[in-house]
Image (cartoon, rainbow, N blue to C red):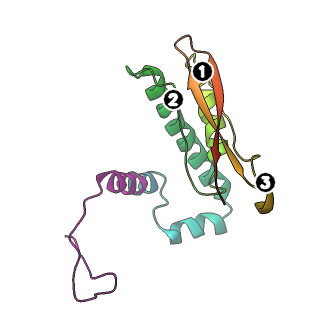
Amino acid sequence: MLICYPTGPDYTVVPEFVDTPKLAKVYNEAEEYGKRIKCSTVAALNKYIKDGNSRGIIQISEARHEKEIAKIADEISNSQHKIRLVLIAGPSSSGKTTFSQRLAVQMRLNGLEPMPISLDNYFKEEKTRLVYPMAVMILSVWKHWIWTSLMIICKE
């Protein structure tokens, strides 16, 4: 059963349903994971924490995350398209740099030579900001990483 409700400025109109299978897959996987570790509700998580078992949940979650990163590295390594560029996007402080470093380790395990490039150190003061550098990673056919800095000139 699916329940839809009005949103937006006109609360008399129910918007058309938009299927999001990838998001549904993530929700289903998270629900199955919660059941598997016997921590599928906030109340169960609170009990783990109260009982002093939060370290175990963190370790299991970290192991699961590492396993997913290894799967991504395998997909990159085994791709018929010879992936040469991996872009990671997300909001500030969401773990992009940490993720890229962990992915690089898994890629090295698969025989690739990645060069993660962090953009965290490219901030300038607002008054002097005229040029915003962005780094791009390119993996050549010979599996050597070359990085190129792109300059986007912003007019103020």
**Disc 2 vs disc 3: which is toward the camera?**
3
Q: Which mark is residue 47?
A: none
Q: Give how far apart the Cα atoms at labels 1 and 2 are.
A: 9 Å
Quarter the C terminus occupies: bottom right
Closer to the camera in the image, 109 or 30 = 109
Give the answer, above or below, for where 12 lies relative to 124. Answer: below
- Residue 91 visible in image: yes
The residue beneath circle 2 is 73
Residues marked 1 and 2 touching at CB (< 8 Å): yes
Q: Which residues are magenta?
A: 1-30
* Horizontal side of residue 149 vs 141, given as left or right: right
- Name which residue lies at 46% across and 25% down: 83
Q: Is residue 17 magenta?
A: yes
- Name which residue lies at 60% across and 30% down: 137
The residue beneath circle 1 is 109
The residue beneath circle 3 is 124
Q: Is residue 85 magenta?
A: no
Numbered disc total: 3
Give the answer, above or below, for where 127 lies relative to 16. Answer: above
- Packing grade of label 1 (10 A; few <14, some 14-19, many >=20) is few
Closer to the camera in the image, 49 or 85 = 85
Residues marked 3 and 1 touching at CB (< 8 Å): no
Residue 102 falls in image quadrant: top right
Sequence-earlier tag: 2 or 3: 2
